[in-house]
Amino acid sequence: MPLLKVENITCGYGDMEVLRELSVEVAEGEIVSIIGPNGAGKSTLMKAVFGLLHPWQGAIHFEGRDISRLEPYQIVETGMCYVPQVANVFTQLTVEENLEMGAFVLKDGDIGARKEKIFELFPRLKERRRQAAGKMSGGERQMVAMGSALMLDPKLILLDEPSAGLAPKMVDHIFERIVRINETGLAIMMVEQNATQSLRMAHRGYVLANGENRFEGTGQALLNDPDVGRLYLGG
Amino acid sequence: MNATQDPTAQAPELTPRLDERIRAALQTRTAMAVILAGLLALIVVLAIVQDVSAGRILSLTVWGIMLGGVIGLGSIGLTLCYGVLKFPNFSHGAMVTLGAYVTFAVMQALPQGEVLRPFSFGWEFLVALIVSMPVVGVVAIGIDRVMYRRLRQRNASLVLFAMASLAMAFFLRSIIYLVWGSDFRFYYEGRANPALDLPFGLRVQADQFFILGLAIVLVIAVYLLLERTKMGKAMRATANNPELAQVRGINTERVVAWTWLMGGALAAAGGAMYGLASQLRPEMGFWLLLPMFAAVIMGSIGNPRGALAGALIIGVAQQVSTAFLNPAYGPGVAFILMVLTLLIRPQGLFGGTE
Ligand SMILES: Nc1ncnc2c1ncn2[C@@H]1O[C@H](COP(=O)(O)OP(=O)(O)OP(=O)(O)O)[C@@H](O)[C@H]1O
Ligand SMILES: [Mg+2]
């Protein structure tokens, strides 16, 4: 049984349809990369999985449970976390408060220990723990956003363009951390503009265009596919 | 010296024009603080010119700080409501009035105890005050459930929210007229509370010190709640980024309920305190609405600390100006300060420049 199973969902904003009969699966411990041109509906898929939009048709199952009618604050408790593409930190809260908000649904206990684990993953955050997240660089913000999402020790994390707008060195650093997080057993579904690089680290990938699933396969197969290469990988 | 640092070496079109430079300088926080301080000084000077004694000016200042505390309690609720719900709540003044009258009603139901000298009130006032705070808070939550929540679910526009709150202000006022009538009411009919004789000709009633003390306690409590508790942090997070708050597992509807509870309770305390210092009238909160909004804008919308600072400035300006102005012009003074803020630095004293 896959960890996440998105089955034939159709969904959009108001009465504008964005996704059409789209299906995606993520197995336990897998990195799944979703690529596609701007406006393809990649972020919309993430929002639908996380309950910010509800599918008009189709179903979303997480660990066998239907989550398509749940609200985001309920989905957090099922063991899935989400890092949005934009506005993904509380700019007016400190780094530490951002992490605490990541563990909001926990009834106290080991929040301190969880914070320490995040600081181990991103030592930079420990130095800046008292700084407002809005005053940090793009890369540091991405660390805060990922750190907050990891506070609950989720089974699956959704990352929407974790490398967008970052310097090449920071992109490498973030990707390296993603692989490291995955090695601890966490499944990852990520959207990326850096298509080639992200397919290289992914176990499987999907190519989305116009709200539909165009190609799917292992990361390597998609990289070698001449059509995918020509249309979506720029050569 | 480096040539580029020499102002005469710069191309003329690169140097900002003088009036632009002046405007930019005026818009800084320091400039605004200086202007406000200057205005307060002007009011004091005007009072001195009119032969008002130093003792009286000092007393008025202390009364102004007390009034600032009352306005501050109201404006903290107003600013929190704006932060979390993103609309100006014009019925907040009516919540202040309601708080004063609910306190009155609870006192009527209680036996009258001994006067707690040197204050003018007995324990029944304190009990009534403590009861009215959660009562008004719950009323605020109830209003949200029947009205604002429905608007939220329909993604109504800001104008609709503002109009709905204005309607609610009139509705609440009518209810108060209906239940308690239009006559002035007093917590203690005809009970005197002589001013204490203090050094420097300062004449302040013990009740006024009580009001000031209680305002300080409540403000510290709000501060601790926002900075230290989980719900307080969730409130700030929701105000900052509501969608992300949901994504992080915060039930934003619960945050909204807590915001109303806090806002309503603080307004009720402010109303009871204001009623103790003067008398109860169905319009009392309405006349506080303008100073409250002025304080919120002056202290940067959505910033509780700023609202408190703004309230203190407005309270003092209003009170000291009564040395030479009819007290009925009080809201006018608040209005002038608000307009000045909007002209000089619309983001307020504590707003960022981003
Ligand atoms: N909040 C919204 N309201 C209405 N339409 C939206 C909204 N967000 C996105 N859309 C529309 O939905 C379509 C898909 O957008 P989406 O953000 O999912 O694309 P994307 O694949 O993530 O693109 P990008 O690579 O630019 O992030 C676009 O046509 C966009 O204009
Ligand atoms: Mg996107």
Image: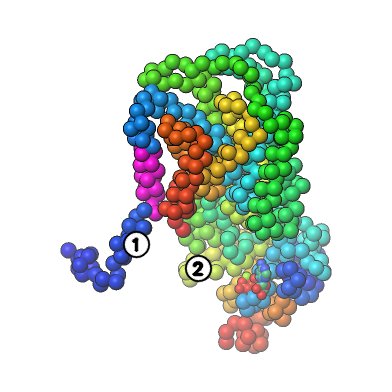
Q: Is residue B66 visible?
A: yes
User: Do the dots labelled 2 and 1 sit on one chain?
Assistant: no
Residue at the spot of label 2: A166
Q: Residues within 10 Å of mark 1 (few under 14, many from 20)?
A: few
| Distance CA(mark 2)–CA(mark 1) | 36 Å
SS type, badge 2: loop
Q: Where is residue A95 drawn, in percent x and y?
A: 53, 51
Residue positioned most to the left: B1
Does B81 lie within the magenta span?
A: no
Q: Where is residue B234 drawn, in percent x and y?
A: 62, 46
Q: Is residue A205 visible?
A: no
Residue at the spot of label 1: B20
Q: Chain of mark 1?
A: B
For ligand 2, give the image quadrant: bottom right
Q: Residue at x 59, y 25 (%)?
A: B276
SS type, badge 1: helix
Q: Is residue A103 left or right of residue A171?
A: right
Q: Residue at x 69, y 64 (%)?
A: A47
Query: In which image quadrant can residue B5 be found?
Result: bottom left
Q: Amino acid at mark 1?
A: Glu
Q: Residues within 10 Å of mark 2 (few under 14, many from 20)?
A: some
Residue positioned most to the top: B114
Q: Is residue A57 left or right of residue B224?
A: right
